[in-house]
Image (cartoon, rainbow, N blue to C red):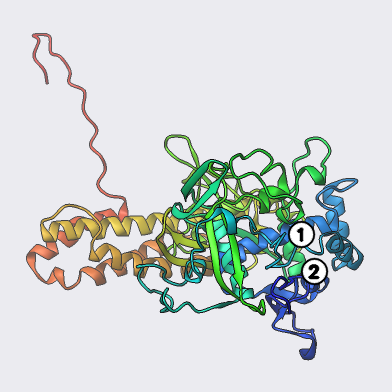
């Protein structure tokens, strides 16, 4: 294997799981990109272990799916064309081979001219590489603390090319803002960048029974504005020349470039002599301007100031708490817009079967990453309001009941602790313990009731769980008079708190007095 290759069309770089009927001797642990499409109907799911890398990989595969099927520019109705692909039961082999033949040299990870999703100019535009530890997002670099693994910049450990690709995807979509390697372009020399397009956000994807179904379900319906021209909306690997870092003109020009060309970080991997490992990497800014954040796989909420923002990834938040925002166009209790892909996905399957997968990183806008986020539901997309509006509404009410009781429990715990300790109302040990116990219990209650379609009495059931947790947390303090008063005084918060007093209007008496 030459160091300028590691060709993703032939190298088995993509870990997968197979459907049960596939013979054991025909089930490799990983497949090449070409094999992934040719056998997508035999693959149950991708087995990428790093959730944000899987999120980025999905977007690459969605774009390739549109290209190999012609669904990026169908000759007739887009929905009918997609049904035709689904009815065939697999991707057309001729279509797969035909597309990859036209870009056969563009999927080499270490190609000197067209390295896959990388910028070959960085060797001359950057002062020096960042180091392999900087590339691997689960490793500490510089003076940062070690969380996932212990490594040192003085003793760098090479990373296998398949894993280097995963971290490349994480950087392109979830890279932090702030300081980066110095890059000089023309007369501009800068060493800072803005955050990646998915930074801090949680990404939602429809899942079918096979990867073939998953990729078709994940295609958002293209906007029907004029005639689509592939050449005017190139994917990064389809460009003969890289984009200009000093302008956003021509960067995102359509649905395909929005999927895979929306990046704020530029990278270049450095291979070992065999091309089996990455030993270093250049990491810097891709564009000086921020590309407008627009994505079809995010829940968009509206701030009090009227600005749209993507729902944050939170490792403490169960996926059930987002479910109604995915099933309903107007969920109760919050102003939000569901991912554009879901109404399109549910149209593809008449029967139950589509699940939802949430992927991301609980992180700050700059360097701090707390925890990866990954969760998958049971089949639920058949409950969308387009398919079953009454059930979707009940799911929203069920989620709201569980959410409300959780918020009231945390408020009661804070109030009880503030009165017991004679301090201000704020986050405390009691509220943290209440949240840690309540939300997993509420999640079990939610899924139990949803599976049984039992919506009556949900509010009382969630409140009963909150009451038991509250009593348990405050039991030791309640053995003193002070603690008992604090406990019982704050208990009313479990039921919504004390009603607010209405200001009574004063009435003037004839003699000018008031009563």
Locate residue 96, reporting x and y percent: 85, 64
Q: Residue furthest top?
A: 511
- Whether tag 1 and tag 2 are in contact, CB under 8 A, the answer is yes
Q: Earlier in the sequence, mark 1 or mark 2?
A: 2
Locate residue 416, reporting x and y percent: 19, 59
From what the image shows, is residue 185 above or below residue 432? above
Which residue, given by chain and number where applicable, does mark 1 sit on?
Answer: 64
Residue count near mark 1 (Cα–Cα under 10 Å), binned few <14, some 14–19, many ≥20:
many
Left or right: where 340 falls relative to 502: right
Image quarter (top left, top right, bottom left or bottom right) of the N terminus: bottom right
**Local SS, label 1:** helix
User: Can residue 376 be seen from the camera position used here?
Assistant: no
Q: Residue at x 12, y 9 (%)?
A: 510
Closer to the camera, 67 or 354? 67
Kindly identify which numbered label has been placed on residue 37.
Answer: 2
Left or right: where 394 falls relative to 226: left
Left or right: where 409 falls relative to 238: left
User: Can residue 181 be seen from the camera position used here?
Assistant: yes
Q: Quadrant of residue 431?
A: bottom left
**Local SS, label 2:** helix
Residue count near mark 2 (Cα–Cα under 10 Å), binned few <14, some 14–19, many ≥20:
many
Q: Exactly how many numbered labels are in the figure?
A: 2
Q: Residue at x 60, y 45 (%)?
A: 245
Image quarter (top left, top right, bottom left or bottom right) of the C terminus: top left
């Amino acid at each position: 294997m030459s160091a300028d290759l590691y060709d993703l069309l032939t190298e088995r770089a993509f870990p997968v799981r197979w459907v049960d009927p596939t013979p054991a001797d025909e089930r490799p642990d990983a497949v090449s990109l070409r094999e992934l499409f040719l056998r997508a109907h035999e693959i149950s799911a991708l087995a990428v272990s790093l959730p944000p890398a899987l999120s980025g990989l999905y977007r690459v595969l969605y774009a390739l799916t549109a290209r190999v099927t012609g669904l990026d520019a169908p000759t007739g109705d887009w929905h009918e064309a997609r049904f035709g692909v689904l009815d065939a039961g697999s991707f057309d082999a001729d279509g797969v081979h035909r597309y990859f033949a036209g870009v056969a040299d563009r999927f080499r990870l270490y190609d000197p001219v067209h390295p896959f999703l990388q910028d070959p100019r960085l060797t001359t535009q950057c002062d020096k590489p960042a180091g392999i530890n900087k590339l691997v997002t689960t490793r500490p670099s510089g003076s940062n603390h070690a969380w996932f693994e212990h490594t040192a910049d003085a003793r760098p450990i090479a990373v296998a090319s398949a894993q280097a690709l995963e971290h490349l995807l994480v950087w392109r979509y979830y890279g932090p803002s702030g300081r980066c390697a110095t890059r000089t372009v023309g007369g501009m020399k800068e060493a800072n960048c803005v955050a990646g397009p998915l930074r801090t956000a949680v990404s939602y994807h429809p899942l079918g029974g096979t990867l073939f179904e998953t990729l078709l379900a994940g295609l958002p319906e293209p906007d029907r504005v004029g005639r689509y021209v592939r050449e005017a909306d190139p994917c990064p690997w389809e460009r003969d020349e890289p984009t200009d870092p000093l302008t956003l003109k021509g960067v995102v020009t359509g649905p395909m470039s929005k999927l895979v060309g929306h990046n704020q970080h530029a990278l270049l991997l450095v291979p070992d002599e065999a091309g089996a490992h990455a030993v270093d990497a250049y990491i810097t800014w891709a564009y000086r301007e921020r590309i407008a954040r627009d994505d079809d796989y995010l829940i968009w909420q509206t701030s009090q100031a009227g600005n749209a923002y993507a729902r944050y990834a939170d490792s403490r938040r169960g996926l059930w708490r987002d479910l109604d925002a995915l099933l309903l166009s107007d969920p109760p209790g919050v102003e939000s817009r569901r991912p554009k892909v879901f109404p399109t996905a549910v149209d593809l399957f008449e029967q139950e079967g589509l699940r939802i997968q949430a992927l991301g990183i609980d992180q700050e806008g700059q360097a701090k990453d707390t925890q990866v986020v990954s969760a998958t539901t049971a089949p639920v997309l058949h409950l969308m309001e387009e398919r079953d509006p009454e059930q979707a509404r009940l799911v929203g009410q069920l989620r709201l009941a569980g959410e409300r009781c959780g918020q009231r429990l945390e408020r009661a715990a804070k109030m009880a602790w503030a009165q017991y300790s004679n301090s201000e109302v704020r986050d405390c040990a009691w509220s943290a313990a209440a949240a840690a116990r309540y939300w997993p219990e509420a999640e079990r209650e939610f899924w139990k009731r949803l599976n049984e379609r039992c919506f009556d009495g949900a509010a009382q059931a969630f409140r009963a769980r909150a009451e038991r947790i509250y009593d348990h947390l405050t039991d030791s303090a309640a053995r003193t008079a002070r603690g008992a008063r604090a406990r019982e005084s704050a208990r009313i918060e479990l039921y919504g708190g004390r009603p607010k007093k209405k200001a009574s209007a004063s009435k003037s008496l004839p003699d000018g007095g008031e009563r």
